[in-house]
Image (cartoon, helix red, strand yellow):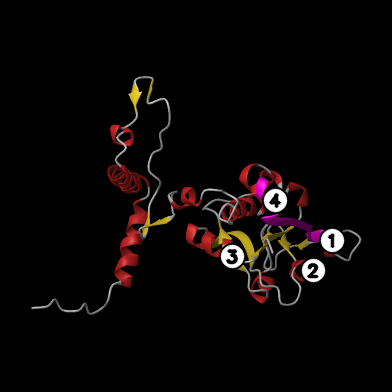
Amino acid sequence: MSWRATILTLFPGMFPGPLGTSLAGRGLERGLWSLEARDIREVTTDRHRTVDDTPFGGGAGMVLRPDVVDAACAAAMPEGEARPLVYLTPRGVPLRQSLVRELAAGPGLVLLCGRYEGVDQRVIEARGMIEVSIGDYVLSGGELAAMVLLDACVRLIPGVMGAAESAEEESFSATEGANLLEYPQYTRPAEWRGLRVPEVLLSGHHAEVARWRREQSEAVTRERRPDLLSEQRRDAAAQAPLHPAASPA
């Protein structure tokens, strides 16, 4: 069975969008994964197809109703559904490559795209939703965030990218236990506008190339994302034994 994605949204026409092109689109055509966008309004029962209401306690904006969201989840997730339910929200846990790998390795996802001021907390808790954020900023809704998460997951599905080693050397991929940004890339021509490709990449010496790439990854990470190196050091310290074995005399 292929990896399955179900989107719960007020704007199903936004899908597949960019997910229908390039690698993700070709994987979709080949049946390596599937995508279904379901309109949350389809489960409403009033003639106005109401999905939201004013927040208790006052404040601006509207909140998606728990009964409507719950009905949409029930319609998309039959009893015994193994796929996790993910709610895209700025207050969620940060989307990191480790989480992407975990989600891509499963049977698929059900994604809830919020709108307005968000979703009633009770249905989030009742449904055990995983709250995920793609960054420290606010979008008009969860649809674009859902596309980002899906693209990150789909490209890891076997057969979608074609060359597995390409994914292994990218930024945030676990190479030798490190969480580093990717090294600079170069291609032909070897000289362009007076700028030459680093000689080590033309040497044919694979060990030296690997060493250079590692050094470049560490340098660019240190410059642009020192927090990643700090996380790496914390992880290493947490995994170290509390009482190292004594060295032999």
Q: In this figure, which residue is indicated by the disc labeled 4?
A: 30
Residue 153 screen position, x and y as percent: 58, 56
Determine whether label 1 and label 2 are within 8 Å by CB: yes
Pick whichever of labels 4 and 2 is earlier in the sequence. 4
Judging depth in this view, the residue of 188 and 145 nearest the camera is 188
Q: Secondary structure at mark 1?
A: helix
Kind of residue indicated by mark 4:
Arg
Q: Are marks 3 and 2 in contact (CB under 8 Å)?
A: no
Q: Within the magenta stretch, is there residue 207?
A: no
Comes first in the chain, label 4 or label 1:
4
Is tag 3's residue or tag 4's residue first in the polypeptide sequence? 4
Residue 185 is marked as none
Are dots 1 and 3 in contact, CB under 8 Å?
A: no
Between 129 and 178, the residue placed more toward the observer is: 178
CA gap between label 3 and label 2 equals: 20 Å
Name the mark nearer the viewer: 1 or 2. 2
Q: Which residue is mark 2?
A: 75
Measured in 3D between alpha carbons, the distance from the residue under mark 4 to the one under mark 2, in whole angstroms, is 27 Å
